[in-house]
Amino acid sequence: MAKPTKYATPICFGLSVLAGIGILISLMYVSPLIAIIALIPTVIYEIYRTEGKSTKISSIIIGIILLLELALIIFNIDIDLTEFLGQESRTIAGYEVPLGTLTVVGPSVMAILSVILFIRTRGKYTKWLAVIIFVTSFAIIYGLDPETFGELFKYGIQEVLDRVAF
């Protein structure tokens, strides 16, 4: 059954503002922690609003990754997945994701899952929330490792160009 939409617009607008403020503060202090904390209400609302099986699972996985990301940063835990798995990249949901440190891979997976949410959901509010998650995920990556952000950005552009037939 569809979720009520009476307050969805002001809630999504408020979550957009909160994420934007979180991103700005994170960039000012070069700390992704604020952006992560500011994203938590958006992810909670996304989990609430999604209804389809794949979209519900995607939003729950985003929530789990976000909480794990928060714990990894708070406790200063980082694992290099490239060394651990012996691979430079992995295919996740049809997208080739470059591997690196676990704290950077988490937001990368969140960004991919937000794209899946955007594509598979019908609701304009869940699409809106997916965009907030996508943008904030890249801000988190930038705050963690600007060099990796640049590489992922170039890689993402190349993926789009490879998938679009001219």
Image: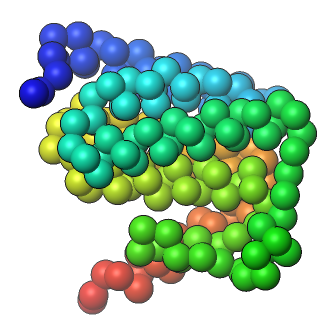
State the residue lying farthest toward the right.
Answer: 76
In the displayed structure, 88 sits above or below 77; it is: below
In the displayed structure, 163 sits above or below 52; it is: below
In the image, 35: left or right of 31? left
Residue at 89% from the left image edge and 39% from the top image edge: 76
Residue at 68% from the left image edge and 50% from the top image edge: 141
In the displayed structure, 98 sits above or below 77; it is: below
Q: x%, y% of residue 84?
A: 82, 71
Q: Is residue 147 visible?
A: no
In the image, 107: left or right of 127? right
Query: Quick one: quadrant of the C terminus?
Result: bottom left
Q: x%, y% of residue 79?
A: 84, 58
Q: x%, y% of residue 44?
A: 44, 25
Q: x%, y% of residue 3?
A: 17, 22
Residue at 65% from the left image edge and 73% from the top image edge: 98
Q: Nearer the viewer, residue 15 or 91?
A: 91
Q: Is residue 163 visible?
A: yes
Q: Residue 151 appears in which quarter of the rendering?
A: bottom right
